[in-house]
């Protein structure tokens, strides 16, 4: 989708259907660029959520005889408290009734899941906001992956094509999310360039590929070791 928006901008410019951005006479191109940023950040957040659910669900299913007490401490803590907190203070996405009396059955189901020592993948997707570096790091810590970006650096550099600074992954991800906030909440799109879009898209693709490999390997390993 983002690639298509970038190509569409090129077609508009070549056809001279809209003036340059500096002329200030048309909002089509800035709008395309801003929309691209919002879309790519939303896609990355959904990707991370889907990845966690898939890997945790697959691990719990593949190694059905896993011992809950053998899982990493942080994973067990979030599995227990996250399962309960998600129903005691349900996020809007669950669309639970407002009155507590009508939520009792949901809370009891959560209690039952905890007593049965289940690992509910969806519990690990309540990231609390857009995927800033802190949010992504914290979500990965919940499955027992400490310093995920530090561990990802070597593989990221290979996909990126060059060496990067120690803080590059954190800083670039925060830059992209901040740009998304500017567009979505302040309608500030004039400082988004085609070069920005291509760099952002490449960055999220490479980071996504690296994190996918690491999360799949880690989650499978911890469930296998818990058997």
Image (cartoon, helix red, strand yellow):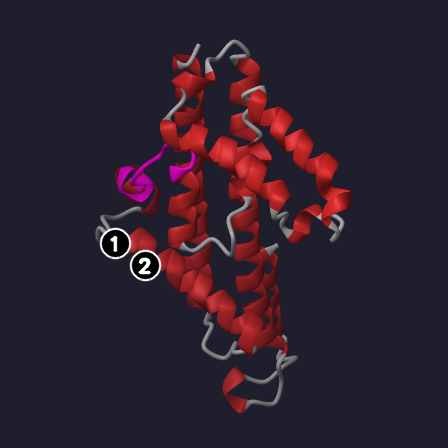
Q: Nearer the viewer, residue 161 or 151?
A: 151
Quarter of the image for the N terminus: give it.
Answer: bottom right
Q: Nearer the viewer, residue 12 or 56?
A: 56
Residue at 56% x, 62% y: name it: 38
Q: Give the range drawn in magenta.
A: 141-152
Residue 119: image location, x then y, percent: 54, 26
Residue 51 visible here? no
Give the class, few, some or many, for how many residues have Cα within 10 Å of label 2's Cα (few <14, many ≥20): few
How many numbered marks, from 0 up? 2
Q: What is the spatial separation of the Cα atoms under label 2 and label 1, in whole angstroms?
A: 6 Å
| Element carrying mark 2 | helix
Residue 165, how many percent across, how many down?
22, 53
Residue 19 in picture, x, y percent from top left:
59, 85
x and y percentages locating residue 62 in the rendered image = 54, 14
Mark 1: few/some/many CA within 10 Å (<14, 14-19, 20+): few
Q: Which residue, given by chain and number where applicable, does mark 1 sit on?
A: 167
- Callouts 2 and 1 close, C-beta under 8 Å: yes
Residue depicted at x 26% and y 39%: 154
- The circle drawn on residue 171 is 2
SS label for mark 1? loop
As drawn, the residue found furthest toward the front would be 101
Residue in the image at 22% along x and 50% along y: 166
């Amino acid at each position: 989708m983002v690639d298509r928006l970038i190509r569409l901008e090129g077609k508009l410019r070549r056809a001279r259907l809209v003036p340059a951005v500096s002329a200030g006479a048309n909002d089509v191109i800035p709008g395309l660029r801003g929309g691209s940023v919002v879309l790519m950040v939303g896609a990355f957040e959904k990707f991370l959520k889907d990845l966690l659910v898939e890997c945790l669900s697959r691990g719990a299913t593949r190694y059905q005889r896993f011992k809950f007490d053998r899982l990493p401490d942080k994973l067990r803590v979030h599995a227990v408290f996250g399962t309960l907190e998600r129903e005691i203070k349900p996020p809007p996405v669950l669309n639970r009734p407002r009155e507590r009396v009508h939520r009792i059955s949901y809370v009891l189901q959560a209690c039952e899941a905890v007593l049965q020592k289940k690992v509910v993948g969806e519990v690990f997707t309540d990231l609390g906001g857009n995927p800033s570096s802190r949010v992504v790091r914290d979500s990965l810590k919940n499955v027992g992956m400490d310093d995920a970006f530090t561990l990802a650096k070597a593989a990221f550099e290979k996909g990126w094509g060059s060496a990067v600074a120690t803080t590059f992954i954190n800083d670039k991800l925060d830059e992209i999310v901040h740009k998304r906030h500017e567009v979505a909440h302040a309608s500030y799109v004039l400082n988004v360039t085609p070069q920005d879009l291509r760099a952002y898209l490449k960055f999220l693709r490479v980071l996504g590929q690296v994190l996918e490999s690491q999360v799949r390997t880690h989650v499978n390993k911890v469930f296998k070791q818990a058997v």
